[in-house]
Structure formats: C-alpha cells, structure tokens
Amino acid sequence: MSRLSHQSFLPRSQPRWNVHPIWRGIGCIFMLLLPVMSFVGAYLIIRENFRQGWVALPASLLRSFSIPSFGTVYLADIALTLVFIIMGFGILTVGYAFLYRLIGPPRFGPLDAPPLRKRRRLYKK
C-alpha cells in the first residue's frame, strides 16, 4: 500500500445528474423515426422531380433496385435520405443544445471559482 492511497486522499464522487427515462424514450423514437421520415421525404421529392423536371439527375443515381413490399427504389433516394438524416440530426442537436443551456444543470458548481470580471478601460476623448 502506497503512502498516497489513504482513504482521505481519494476524490469524493459527485452526485450524478441522471436523465429522466422519458427523454431516453424520446431519443429512441427520434433515432427510429427520423430515418424513416427522411426516406419517405426523399422518395416523394425524387418522384416529384421526375414529373416536374427541377434538377437533372446523373445516370449513376438513376440506377434502381426493387424492394418487394415497397417498389422501385433509386440510388438517388438513398443519397437524398442520407442528406436528410444528417440535416435532421444536426437540427435536433442544435435544438438539444439550446434546451440544455436553458434547463440543464448550472454552469458553475459549488466548488468553482466565480468568473473573472473584465476591467473596462476608460478612453480619453
């Protein structure tokens, strides 16, 4: 046993800030629902693009394969789905950060030093 392994030298454990179980459930629902919504949105936008002719798609993205219960899926559907998923999770992350800042735990704990005040310089006119 070393000299510094005495019980009084060990750091005290801080109480953990536990997440309410309902937020875990909401996060799980979003992780399942957002990719499904992204695929459906991409599917509808690509089909409407075929009818309206908004953007000319390259031939490599027009390759298709068939899903028995769904129908024909183009590679453009998959590519646009990935874009929508990245955008959706980015929006959720920014929203979560905003809410965490509003209703999360305090920024400084009881053992933190108070923030330093900046001295303002007086300028002569």
Image (cartoon, rainbow, N blue to C red):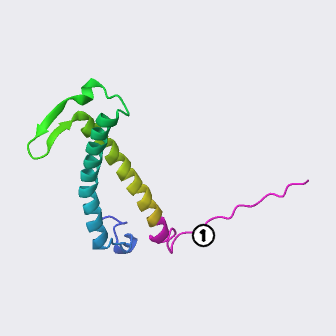
Identify whether 58 is placed above or below 93: above
Residue at 25% x, 39% y: name it. 77
In the image, taking residue 108 as reference, residue 82 lies left or right, namely left
Amino acid type at circle 1 is Pro
Considering only vertical position in the picture, is 25 above or below 79? Answer: below
- Identified at 29% across, 39% down, the residue is 46
- Where is residue 29? Give x, y as percent: 25, 62
Residue drawn 43% across the image and 60% down it:
95
Residue tagged by mark 1?
Answer: 114
On the rendered structure, is 63 left or right of 125? left
Image quadrant for the N terminus?
bottom left
- In this view, the residue farthest toward the front is 51
- Residue 90 sits above or below residue 100 on the image: above
Quadrant in the picture for residue 2: bottom left
State the image coordinates of residue 84 (x, y, percent, origin top left): 33, 46
x and y percentages locating residue 17 in the rendered image = 37, 72
User: What residue do we see at 30% from left, 36% from top?
Assistant: 51
Q: Judge the density around disc 1: few (<14), some (14-19), many (≥20) Cα neighbours within 10 Å.
A: few
Is residue 16 shown in magenta? no
Q: Secondary structure at mark 1?
A: loop
Magenta residues, start to end: 101-125
